[in-house]
Image (tube, rainbow, N blue to C red):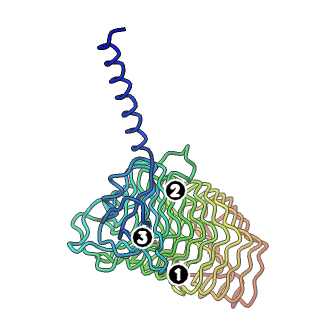
Amino acid sequence: MSPKVISRIMVVALAAFVGLQGQSLLASTNVAVGPSTCQPGLVHFTTIQAAVSAVPFGSTVLVCPGTYPEQVAITQPLTLKGVTDGTGNAAVITVPGGGLILNANAPTAFGLVSAQLVVQNTVGVTVSNLTVDGTGSNCVPGAVREAGIVVYNVGTSNDGVSAAKIQNVSVRNEHGCGVGEGVISDTAFATISSNQIHNIDFTGIVVAGGKANVASNNIQTAGLNGVAMDTANQTVVTGNTVSTVNQAGLLVQLNTTAATISKNTVVSSPSAVGIWLLSVFNTPTNGNRISNTTWGVVLQFCAGNVVQSNSFSELGADGILDQNSFGGNIVTKNTINEAAFGIFTDSTTGGDTLVPNSLFNTVVTVDPSPASLGTPVI
């Protein structure tokens, strides 16, 4: 073999080796956002968005304690995680100095949205241990809502509820132009768990389309609802605590089918419905605890739901309000203690099972007409 041929073989082999090395550099990695004293030894970025945009698929972006005035968009698989530096301070995403811009979509629920953090058109994203603070949010032209976090078009039904995970996040002070939402999951297959959500204009967590597991969240002080579901079939809402809302602790509506509402607690919301099922089908609602609301559970235009083993107490109106039923609801084995009325069912309701339930300290067992106290209107 001539020296020239040997030389060419060596060049090709070297090029192939370098190419392989280049691929290894493009493999998933860990990077940090914030000062170099935090997570030393990692490549550092000054903004979250710069890090998210630079890393390969499957990487982990560690966000050090500090304030990050930016809107962040995640469009590829990765983990975004807040870390501590020994002080216990949080990594906080805040509103940019120039205000928010229109950057997200939630077509099933609302339409165009301005979001502080948006996960969209991807799969395999986990966001954890961050704070999203909407203090100073502005009115954004064209935005129907302002939100702390939006998860849109993430995953498919094959992903179950693991295409996106929002965990151990605090979302607060979402008051943008009076239309602030906490977390919106729209056409996504997501897990939203163990989050702290408070001081929201409208709703703490919205699930519209897709499928979600909404578990063990603490939601306080929302202008409308704790959790609202809209066409969210097979979504599970369990173990959440909701307090100080003005419309419903848990609102399930608009042809949602086969969801599960279990072991949630709704307290200290005297002008609200505890659990409101509105045009909902085949959705078990069991083991929830509702206190200090106006109504315990409301069923309207529903069919085939099982509402059992719930506890309702300190109610201003009805423990159970069953109105305009399509039939086949089983509302039994619930306990109502201290309510103006035990049960109301209207003349159009037929085919529902409403006994036995345990009623204690109710002024009237069967409500002859809830009109004197009004009925909830969406």
Q: Residues within 10 Å of mark 1 (few under 14, many from 20)?
A: many
Relative to residue 252, is residue 8 depicted above or below?
above
* Residue 190 image label: 2
On the image, numbered disc 1 is attached to which residue?
272
Dot 1 or dot 3: first in sequence order is 3
On the image, numbered disc 3 is attached to which residue?
38
Q: Name which residue type carries label 2.
A: Ala
Distance CA(mark 3)–CA(mark 2)? 30 Å
Q: Name which residue type carries label 3.
A: Cys
Query: Residue 125: x and y, percent?
Result: 47, 54
**In front: mark 1 or mark 3?**
3
Q: Residues within 10 Å of mark 3 (few under 14, many from 20)?
A: some
Q: Are marks 1 and 3 in contact (CB under 8 Å)?
A: no
What's the residue at 52%, 71% (across, down)? 195
Relative to residue 1, is residue 212 depicted above or below?
below
* Circle 1: element type: loop
Relative to residue 76, is residue 169 depicted above or below?
below
Residue found farthest to the top: 1
Query: Residue 262: x and y, percent?
Result: 66, 67
What's the residue at 33%, 52% (across, down)? 54
